[in-house]
Image: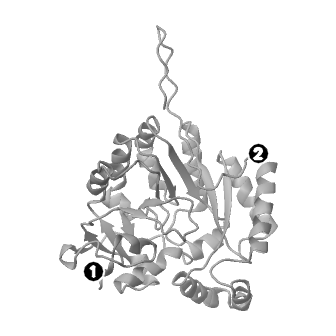
Amino acid sequence: MRWENLSPDSEHGRADAALFGAEAVTTRTFDTPEFRGITFHEIRARSIVNRVPGASRMPFEWTVNPYRGCSHACVYCFARKTHSYLDLDTGLGFDSQIVVKVNAPELLRHQLASRSWHGEHIAMGTNVDCYQRAEGRYRLMPGIIEALRDHANPFSILTKGTLILRDLPLLRQAAEVTDVGVSVSVGFTDEELWRTVEPGTPAPERRLDVVRAFTDAGIGCGVLMAPVIPFLGDRPEQLRATVRAIAASGATSVTPLVLHLRPGAREWFMSWLAEHHPHLVARYERLYAEGAYAPRWYQRRITRQVHDLAREYGIGPARAGAPRRIPAPAPQEPELPTQLTLL
């Protein structure tokens, strides 16, 4: 296993200087139902704040990823390729060989305090899910959120995991001092499709329960409707059912994103497609003949349909890259006039 090839930039497809050495790796397995078949590689990272390459389509520049690999096992996950830099399998290995950066909270706190850091927005959950099952055991996110809160550093979280509700009080505290964005990923509500393409995730309805809980707590939460899967989750009635459920959850916005198939993910997804829907293989080869992304005409069609449905159900699209501001709890009526606080 090429641990020396894991570098800060290799999170996004480059392998430069080592992020940690092989001597720093501790491998563990746990014989419990939720972790059976999963191997954890605990490492002490040398860097935790990663710069997104300039050529990326991502609307942010900095990320924090406390884990590599993801037990959510989404067959389409674009991050699968990153496992190849460690000589790990990008298929089942990505789903079951999880790298855990056990020192992520303390390392982040140190980097945020550095004079070279200027408080830029940090995105989380953009590579693999920071609230995957491993987080229930390793509990890295509370320390990460506390560090961001204590430095008033703006950040956003995207997740399919319901475990984020554990950290809701910390998110409220952080929102009192900085901009905080929370979004949940729900690409479809079709249960049969969910069980086959996202077998390790909470059900779509459970994820929408997260949105409801945030809404009930007075916290705005957007939904990234991703991925919209061509020929499997893009029928008009499927899009309508999904947007209707998202609206009913109280989401502040819905933003559609069509499936994209980067190298690593493409091979695994097409293998799955050949097994489960062989009649669609040729259609996918044509649709994605030009590369990782579906044609613009298809993306625009899906976006238009979802936005029309969102307006019908009373929710609007999110601005690309815009964080979801979490309002601080309403202050009690003061007995004497006080100066307003700029949050």
* Residue 278 image offset from top left, x and y in percent: 68, 91
Compare marks 1 and 2 and give the one earlier in the sequence: 1
Q: CA distance from mark 1 to mark 2?
A: 50 Å
> In the rendered structure, which amino acid carries the disc numbered 1?
Glu
> In the rendered structure, which amino acid carries the disc numbered 2?
Gly
Front-most of residues 193 and 284:
284
Above or below, 327 against 239 in this view is above
The scheme the figure's colours follow is: one colour
Q: Residues within 10 Å of mark 1 (few under 14, many from 20)?
A: some
Question: Which of the numbered marks, if any, corresponds to residue 4?
Answer: 1
Tell me the quadrant of the picture where the N terminus can be found: bottom left
Above or below, 279 against 330 in this view is below
* Residue 246 image offset from top left, x and y in percent: 68, 53
Above or below, 261 against 224 in this view is below
* Residue 145 image offset from top left, x and y in percent: 38, 48
* Residue 317 image offset from top left, x and y in percent: 70, 52
Q: Residues within 10 Å of mark 2 (few under 14, many from 20)?
A: some
Q: In the rendered image, which residue does mark 2 sit on? A: 314
Q: Residue furthest front?
A: 116
Labels 1 and 2 touching (C-beta < 8 A): no
Above or below, 194 against 169 in this view is below
Q: Which of the 4 image quadrants contains residue 280? A: bottom right
Front-most of residues 219 and 299:
299
| Residue 34 visible in rendering | no
Which residue is at a point 26% across and 70% down the rendered structure image? 42
Taking the image as shown, residue 140 lies to the left or right of residue 161, namely: left
